[in-house]
Amino acid sequence: MARGRPRTFDKERALDAALAVFWRRGYHGASLTELTRVMGISKPSLYAAFGNKERLYLAALQRYRERRLAVHADVLAVEPDLKKALRGFLRSVATMLTEPGLPGGCMVVNSAASCDRTTLPSRVIDAIDESIQVSSLGLLKGRLEEGLRRRTLPEGTLVGELADYLAAFMSGMAVLAKTGVTADRLFATIEHALRALPDPDPNTESVEG
């Protein structure tokens, strides 16, 4: 009896389906049974295509960074005015967190908060930490340091602490979004958060470029 053709599947679509599960449930909360069901593949096919659950999560997280986090980074980079750039960045994040049809919240925050970090594989912990640096702390600190160089922030501004504050605020938005808080409410809280941004010294001219 002739053997049938091996089952084929769209790897990119399967990865998007896995991403949604990890986004909603975190690393440990995403079972192989649910992952294979939504991906439309068997466990052997998952192992053949992605290696194992850990590698599948890492691939999904990278896709999340490329498809979602890069959008926020672009918003932060293109606006020359510091306060407007931060407002646009935070509103972009808030829009994603509350977008209908998405799992809700932030995949990185969900994964970090859903379980004891000591129970996560070391490569998953490293990838989450790197994503936090790339998507929030690193971007915010870099933009604030630019503001300091251009003198749109007063000399002596504690850029690291300010970046930590805004990153913590973003994590809070992610938690609120998971509870059903609307984008408009998050937009309103963003205006309060931006009050922590010190005004430039009126006696110092800003430096362009």
Image (spheres, rainbow, N blue to C red):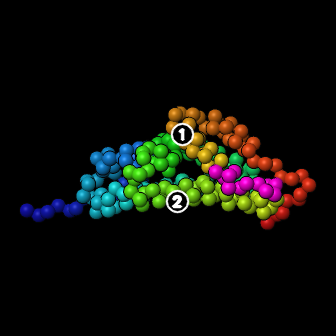
Mark 2 / mark 1, whichever is N-terminal: 2
Name the element at disc 2: helix
Q: CA distance from mark 2 to mark 1?
A: 20 Å
Q: Is residue 131 left or right of residue 88?
A: left
Instruction: Determine if residue 194 is in view.
Output: yes
Q: Which mark is residue 175?
A: 1
Q: Nearer the viewer, residue 191 or 13?
A: 191
Q: Residue at x 77, y 59 (%)?
A: 148
Q: Which residue lies at the image location 45% right of the left edge and 56% below the top edge? A: 125
Residue 95 image-quadrant placement = top right
Disc 1 packing (10 Å; few <14; some 14–19; many ≥20):
some
Residue 5 as seen in the image, left or right of residue 194: left
Q: Amino acid at mark 1?
A: Val
Give the amino acid type for the residue marked by disc 2 in the picture: Glu
Element type where label 1 sits in the image: helix
The quadrant holding residue 158 is: bottom right
- Given residues 22 and 109, the one toward you in this image is 109
Give the image location of residue 154, x and y in percent: 82, 55
- Magenta segment range? 153-164
Image spot of residue 22 (x, y percent): 41, 48
Question: Circles 2 and 1: CB distance less than 8 Å?
Answer: no
Please tell me which residue lies in front, 48 or 100. Answer: 48
Q: Which residue is mark 2?
A: 130
